[in-house]
Every structure is written in C-alpha cells, then in structure tokens.
Amino acid sequence: MQVHIRQIYVSPGHNYFGHHGQPAGENPIVPVGQVTCRAGRGLEGDRFFDYKPDYKGQVTFFAWEVYEAIKRELAVSDLAPGAFRRNVLLEGADLDALIGRRFQIGGIGFEGSGEAKPCYWMEQAVARGAEAWLRGKGGLRAKILTDGILIPGVAELTVQGEPPLSPVAAR
C-alpha cells in the first residue's frame, strides 16, 4: 500500500516530556529533508535518540488526516504540523491498526508499540480542547527495527501478518 510521508521532524530537546509542574521547554521542532533511523536507538538528531534501551517511542507517527481535521474542528487554520511534536506525519495509513504489528515504510522496519497519547500540554501547543479531541488519535509510538534513511514523499507501507491494512479515507 502506498502512503505519503508529508513531513519529518526532529527536536534536540524536550519541551513537555519531563516538564510536569514546570514551564514548557523552548526546544525547536525542526523539519528535515531526511532522517537516519537507527535500529533500537531512534532517529539521529532527535531528543529520544539513545533515550534508554528498548524504548517504545523511538519514533512517533501522526496521521496527516488527523492534522487536517483538528485544524477544521478546533478552528486553528494556521496550526503548524509540527505543533504535535511527532516525528513523522504520514498520510494514507490507519496508525491504530499498526499497534502491536511489525511494518515497513520505505523499506525500514518498525514495530508499533502503542498510541502516542495526547496530554494536557496539547492545550498549550495546539488549542483549547485539543487534549480531549485527540484522545484515540494522538498518533503511534514505534520501535525502529532496521537501519535506514526515511525521506518525505510517497513510500510503500507493508505490514507483517493478518489482517492486511486498508487505505485510510479522509476524515
């Protein structure tokens, strides 16, 4: 199945993770033209690279369709796609269907480990009501299984096991 990698982001540091009860950090979320994925380690240049062994959030995916929908639903037409601080904005795949499954995008192996659950910081980063609106559609946390370079553009998504994935309809 073909998907579209719309944007890739990395950040050198955490703005929200580990900041409970403190002000948000000021680390930029940086769009990149490509990123090197390292098996078991994360994305080179990202805050979670070598965070800890076997970390389940070495990379985070976010659905482009959800990004477009939240802009409409919460009336934030100028919202930047990096506001969610997810690494890869992906169009055309049901991210929830990848939880617990091994898959490849552009020949790079991943394993979906769970939802990238929204937290109260989304109220500040996105808009009021964003945390509740994003429940169940906050993205996908995954482990990286094979090394490779991920590049924006059209890519092939293959999934191991049954059932096969269906393309996502616009939401």
Image (cartoon, grey):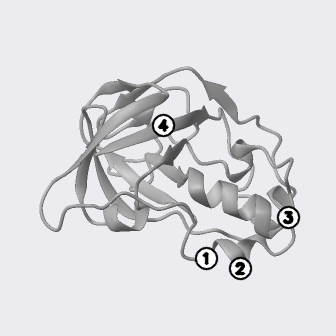
Q: What element carries label 3?
A: loop
146 horizontally vs 144: left or right: left
Q: Mark 4 near mark 2, Cβ–Cβ under 8 Å?
A: no
Residue 90 image position (x, y, % from top left)? 49, 46
Name which quarter of the figure residue 13 lies in.
top right
Q: Residue at x 68, y 62 (%)?
A: 69
140 horizontally vs 117: left or right: left
Q: Residue at x 77, y 44 (%)?
A: 80
Q: Which of marks 1 and 3 is nearer the N terminus?
A: 3
Q: What element carries label 2?
A: helix
Inspect the image, locate mark 1, and give the three-letter code of the amino acid beneath it.
Answer: Arg
Q: 114 and 49: which one is in front?
A: 114
Query: Which residue was labeled with disc 2?
Result: 132
Q: Is residue 50 above or below residue 122?
A: above
Q: Label 2 vs label 3: CA separation?
A: 11 Å
Q: Label 1 vs label 3: CA separation?
A: 14 Å
Residue neighbourhood size for the residue with mark 1, other residues' Cα within 10 Å, grouped as few (<14), some (14–19), many (≥20): some
Residue 127 is tagged as 3
Residue neighbourhood size for the residue with mark 2, other residues' Cα within 10 Å, grouped as few (<14), some (14–19), many (≥20): some
Query: Which residue was labeled with disc 1?
Result: 135
